[in-house]
Image: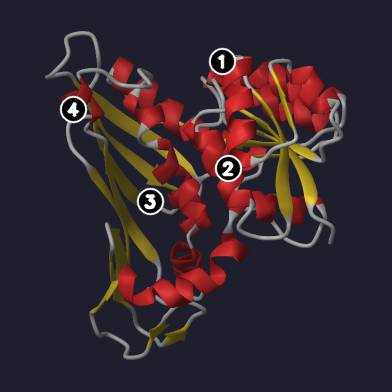
Amino acid sequence: MTALRVGLSGAGPAGLGAVQAARSHDDCDVVAVHDRDPAAARRLARGSGLGFATGDFDELLGYGVDFVVLTGPLADRVDQVRRAAEQAVPCLVHAPMAPDLAAAREMAAVAAAHEVRLGVCVPGQADPVVEQLRRMIASDWLGGVVAVQAIRGDDELLRAGSVTHRGDPFLTLGSEHVHLATWLTGRRAASVTAQTTRSFAPDLDDGGVATVVLRGNVPCTYVMSRLTRAHAFAIHGTDGGLRIAGDRIWLSGHRPFDGHVFAYETPGLEQVLNRRDLEHAIAAHRAGAELHGRFARWLDDTDDFPCPAEQAVVDLEVVYGMVRAAATGRTVRL
């Protein structure tokens, strides 16, 4: 497969990260950058050795790119996807997918109408460890899934007195874990209850908690906070469980599993792993799991992609179910 040519929209930190990620393998490479601020686009182009920079999105599409990566403002997403689709250019957007559910649905519908592929880059799905855990769950390693727990915190509000993204905490902090829960369990949500908290800033919800019931009556709890740093995710089954918190991975299952990153050898044994000890194996598989390259292979029909637009919309329906449930105090049926 020849490396696909990528056009990048968004010259901020996420855009720089996309350039670096795409250069970790041979499946694709960023060749041009667009930003509302042409000077920002030129700075990224000079610093990264890109051959083209522009403040005009149509010029980016006309540069001869095989697909575009959208890391810029959420408010631009619908228009950018429509303009790209009209020119048969696939789009990979960085999560969160859109500013609201209606926009996400419109993006998916536009891509489908023009028969172009649209995917969402969810950071956790690029982790070789998480990919192995997905395979372990699918193999019945922990038995039937009975509960999911997730917590996500970013203390930018305390450190800076403001936040970069003022959107609802369920969207800005919780959406990645919702994507991961669906991907890892293979179950859709049936209902949502939720509430928010406001204790630091008078005009901003700084926390939230939601309970999602997956089909099969599997409860999931999601906790989000703008007042602390936290990132933990756990799935419990009838015969074991797994938990990721920081660099630690806790495991207990009812059968051995010899994976591509690590081995679980003794059924019933609680095994605790440190990512530092797995770094060699993780590094060996990081390029294959990297999502820009995986999207390129998906376009070339040599791989699948973990979060196509249709799935992303289903997951965002859960997130916005949380928003509605918190606003109304009622259970939202999905």
Asked if labels 1 and 4 touch by Cβ distance under 8 angstroms, the answer is no
| Dot 2 amino acid type | Ala
- The residue that label 3 is drawn on is 217
Residue 19, image x and y in percent?
A: 60, 43
Sooner in the amino-acid sequence: mark 3 or mark 4: 4
Discs 4/1, front: 4
Image label count = 4
Sooner in the amino-acid sequence: mark 4 or mark 1: 1
* Residue sitting nearer the eye, 160 or 139: 160
Vertical placement of residue 99 versus 170, above or below: above
| Dot 1 amino acid type | Ala
Residue 107, image x and y in percent?
A: 68, 25
- The residue that label 2 is drawn on is 18
Vertical placement of residue 129 versus 186, above or below: below
Q: Which mark is residue 306?
A: none
| Dot 3 amino acid type | Asn
Residue 274, image x and y in percent?
A: 28, 71
Q: Say which element carries label 2.
A: helix
Q: Residue at x 32, y 49 (%)?
A: 219
| Mark 4 to mark 1 CA distance (whole Å) | 26 Å
Sooner in the amino-acid sequence: mark 1 or mark 2: 2
- The residue that label 4 is drawn on is 159
Sooner in the amino-acid sequence: mark 4 or mark 2: 2
Q: Say which element carries label 3.
A: loop
| Dot 4 amino acid type | Arg
- The reply to whether residue 279 is in sight is yes
Asked if labels 2 and 1 touch by Cβ distance under 8 angstroms, the answer is no
Answer few, some or many: residues within 10 Å of disc 3's Cα (few below 14, many 20 plus, some between 14 and 19).
Answer: some
Answer left or right for 255 relative to 138: left
Q: Say which element carries label 4.
A: helix
